[in-house]
Amino acid sequence: MKTRVTPISQTKTQALARALGSVSHGYTRACMGTVPLERLSALAAKFDARYGIAHTKGQRVVNKRAGRANTLFVAYSPPDEYRIENERLPWMLLSTHGEGVETERWQDVRDRPIWLDYQLCRHNDAGEVRWTWRRTSAEMTNLYAELGEDLARRRHDQVARTLQRIANQPGFHGVRAQSAALCAFATSRGYEGPLPTLFFVQKVPHGKPLLIV
């Protein structure tokens, strides 16, 4: 019997990129939760037994032709040195349209779910609608307030550190657009220091394979 595996992302960027790529390829429903590290393997095995999260491309084609839903599992599990004691790991199960997954409580991705502190949304790219991640409205409000306070008090060293922290966050289109707006806000309020480079998310591996047993 062929070994069944599913990748487990070790960075937020990996996890967000895997979920985003899935949505862009027709996975239109999502459900989310958290799980203790010691239960992650059991959860993946349960989802595979029920829905075939480790199916091959061929099996997914057969499912689609038969009207059955295909599913995909994404989880964020940082390396041991970055893990907090008793931390619960966030996961997302995604599904295409089709039958066989009715027992889960699904959220339509068009309702802009929030995961790993980022919100899924669509944007217009030269007339073509694409999916991206962005910071939540609450997070942006906090960042504007933080920058505004430091700018008013002329704490430009702290402004520079905040802008660099912003630039280090995952460079998806929506996040980059928000980062550029925050940089423009700082310069409009008198900040004359260097602005950080806003990097694009490069193609990243989906994560470390988890053997499903």
Image: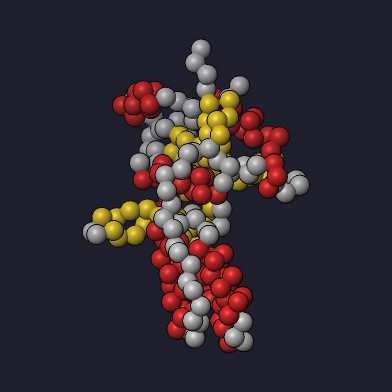
* Residue 31 appears in the picture as rendered: no
Q: Which of these two is toward me, 124 or 200?
A: 200
Q: Is residue 161 left or right of residue 21?
A: right
Q: Is residue 34 left or right of residue 108?
A: right
Position of residue 133 relative to residue 148, above or below, is above
Kindly indicate the quadrant of the structure image that contains residue 70: top left
Colour scheme in the image?
secondary structure
Q: Residue at x 65, y 42 (%)?
A: 79
Q: Residue at x 46, y 46 (%)?
A: 17
Q: Residue at x 53, y 76 (%)?
A: 144
Q: Residue furthest left?
A: 127
Q: Position of residue 83 (x, y in %)?
A: 70, 46
Q: Which of these two is toward me, 102 or 36?
A: 36
Position of residue 46 relative to residue 166, above or below, is above
Q: Position of residue 97 (x, y in %)?
A: 37, 38
Position of residue 158 relative to residue 66, above or below, is below
Q: Residue at x 29, y 55 (%)?
A: 129
